[in-house]
Amino acid sequence: MKPYIFIKQTLDFALALIGMLLLWPFFLIISILIKSTSRGPILFRQKRLGKNKKEFYILKFRTMRTDTPAEMPTHLLQDPDFFITKVGKFLRRTSLDELPQIINILKGEMSIIGPRPALWNQYDLIAERDKYGANDIKPGLTGWAQINGRDELPIEVKAKLDGEYATRITFKFDIKVFFKTLLSVVKSDGVREGSSEQEVTSNTKGVTL
C-alpha cells in the first residue's frame, strides 16, 4: 500500500470535519428549503458499493419526489424533470446535493477524491472496475472520471479512468482533481438529466430496476 494512502485517510477526516463545522449554516438552510417545498425526508439514502465492494448507504440532500423509481441513475430516467423538485434542480446544478457525503467521509466510507461509488446493481460498471482495480480503493465525493466527462462517459471509459486514478494516487494528483472539480461544477460539465428510451434500454443491461 502506498504511504500516501495513510496520509490521505487522515486528510479526508480532517478536511471533512472542518467542512462540517464551516458549512453547517448551509446544511440548515437547505434542509429548511427541502422540507418546506416538498413532501418527504430531507436526506436521501441509497445503497452503493465502497472499498472492496462493501455495501454502504450514501447520503444526499433529497432532490426528487418520493415516487421516483428507485435504484435507477437519474440520467437514465426518460422524464427526470417530472421527478426533480424545484429546489432539487438548483441543488443538482450546483452539486450542493452532495454535501451530506461529508458524513460518509467522516464515517470512513468515502474519500474526498476517488471513483464515484457505483449503485449496488450497476453490474457492468462494477465488472469493468474490477479489471482495473478501481473497486479496491475508497470511493470519492469527486474523481478523475467526473472531471473527464461524468455522465457522458461510456461505462468502459469511466471504469478505465477510475482505474487510472487507483494506480496514480498521490497528493499532487488529488489536488489537481479537486481544483478541476471546482471548475467543472461552475461550468456544469458532463451533467445529463434524462435519457431517450433507446439509451435506457442499452445502459441498463445487467441492472435490476
Image (spheres, grey):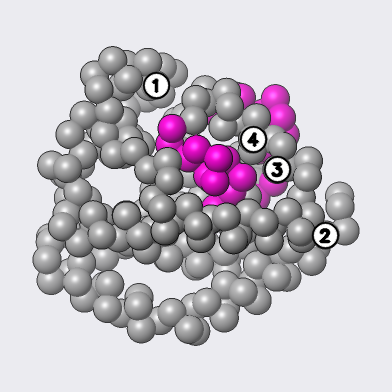
Task: Specify which label sits upstream in the sequence, 3 or 2.
Answer: 2
Q: Nearer the viewer, residue 108 or 91?
A: 91
Quarter holding residue 131: top right
SS under mark 3 = helix
Q: Residue at x 51, y 50 (%)?
A: 56
- Would residue 175 be found to the left or right of residue 191 on screen? right
Picture layout, residue 3 above or below residue 205: below
Q: Which residue is mark 4?
A: 161
Q: Which residue is mark 3?
A: 165
Task: Specify which label sits upstream in the sequence, 4 or 2.
Answer: 2
- Would residue 6 be found to the left or right of residue 175 on screen? right
Residue 153 painted magenta: no
Task: Specify which label sits upstream in the sequence, 1 or 4.
Answer: 4
Task: Specify which label sits upstream in the sequence, 2 or 1.
Answer: 2
Picture layout, residue 26 above or below residue 48: below
Q: CA distance from mark 1 to mark 4?
A: 18 Å
C-beta proximity under 8 Å, tags 4 and 3:
yes
Q: Which residue is mark 2?
A: 4
Q: Residue at x 57, y 55 (%)?
A: 180
